[in-house]
Amino acid sequence: MSFENGGAFLREIRSEVETYLGSRGTRVRGRLELYAKSAVALPLLAASWAVLVFVRPGLLLGLLCLLGCVLGAVLVGFCVQHDANHGAYFRSRRLNHLLGWTTDALLGFSSYAWRVKHNVAHHTYTNVDGYDDDIDQTPFARMLPSQPARPWYRLQHLYVWPLYTLMLIRWQIGADVAALVRGRIANSAIRVPRRWDLVGLLAGKAIFVGWAIVVPLLFYPWWIVAAGYAGFAMAASLVTATTFQLAHCVEEAASASAEELATTRRLWAVHEVESTVDFCPRNVVLTWLLGGLNFQIEHHLFPRVPHTHYPRISEIVRRKAAEHGVRYTAQPSLRAAIRSHQRHLRALGRIGRPVEIEMG
Ligand SMILES: [Zn+2]
């Protein structure tokens, strides 16, 4: 199963983006803005955690510190590890992997497994049934028309939200290791890590368990640590899952089965743009916080470009999409994006064989 590469659509976009990134000043500014986010995310997480654990500040301030931990972790997820694991942070692959290891040490799951799950399975085969692991949540939820119907999916638009809060915990307690043992993530092969990759995985798990559970247990009773960890992981998970779902699991996002792609060869770039949706492109606060993941169309076309350039690149992609008749969707608000996700889940939840989703 593969896509057609190239095409005038992508060629013209690339040419304009290269002209935009041709200026050294633009490239340096983009990188400095990216580095500034690490300088906020990492100290915010560290300081919130240190005050929470060592100062033991009481309930209200304690909750505020926990919120700081959640915000810090979300920023690490969206603005540090995501770019680094895509190779967008530095020129050096080794440095990118080193910073990408914040996934292991600070978020609790394997960056080695993430690079296959996200960079290969999700980015190459976006919204392709059986290939994109992100969109396969069966038998819990049906997110593509080609997935089989089950009676309980009728309520999925309600119960997916608590499920989203468990996504990170699932990976933290071993879904990543299970994938390594299985040797596959969806249809993408993954090898058992060796040498430094294995050291990184084991050390990362140990460090995460150390700061998130063992050290707090020295200062608090177990039930407070359990509640704190659950609150932290569930809140960070909900924000992360929702952000990814609003880009791909909505009415306007196209999808495909492997059979469809085998019979009609599609241009990869066109598929990426039509299977992805931007949201809140004018919201500067959200754009800063989400690491440009509200510009996921641009991210899917240019995953190795620092996300700080996406707002400008989106002007190019949007214009070229209109010229080439490619469907480009940007939801104006968070509310509109969430409502579209809900309608999509509701439509797919109705019992029956594959449903036709009305395209916007
Ligand atoms: Zn990505």
Image (spheres, grey):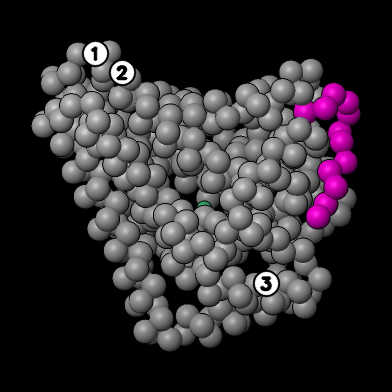
Crowding at mark 1 (Cα within 10 Å: few <14, some 14-19, many 20+): some
Give me the C-alpha separation between circle 3 and circle 2.
Answer: 46 Å
Q: Which residues are magenta?
A: 349-360
Crowding at mark 2 (Cα within 10 Å: few <14, some 14-19, many 20+): some
Q: Is residue 304 above or below residue 80?
A: below
Determine the secondary structure under disc 2: helix
Q: Position of residue 334 (x, y in %)?
A: 59, 51
Q: Position of residue 284 (x, y in %)?
A: 46, 64
The residue tagged 1 is 222
52 relative to 102 in the view: left or right: left
Residue type for callout 3: Arg
Do we see residue 5 in this rendering? Answer: yes
The residue tagged 2 is 226
Magenta span has 248? no
Q: Residue at x 76, y 74 (%)?
A: 322
354 relative to 216 in the view: left or right: right
Q: Quadrant of residue 153?
A: top right
Magenta span has 355? yes
Give me the C-alpha separation between circle 2 and circle 1.
Answer: 6 Å
The residue tagged 3 is 318
Do we see residue 2 in this rendering? Answer: no
Q: Residue at x 43, y 86 (%)?
A: 23
**Label 1 beta carbon less than 8 Å to ligand 1:** no
Residue type for callout 2: Ala
Give me the C-alpha separation between circle 1 and circle 3.
Answer: 52 Å
Q: Main secondary structure of the magenta part?
A: loop
Q: Quadrant of residue 328?
A: bottom right
| Numbered badge on residue 341 | none
Q: Which circle's residue, 3 or 2, is located before the other in the chain?
A: 2
**Contact between labelled residues 1 and 2, with CB atoms less than 8 Å apart:** yes
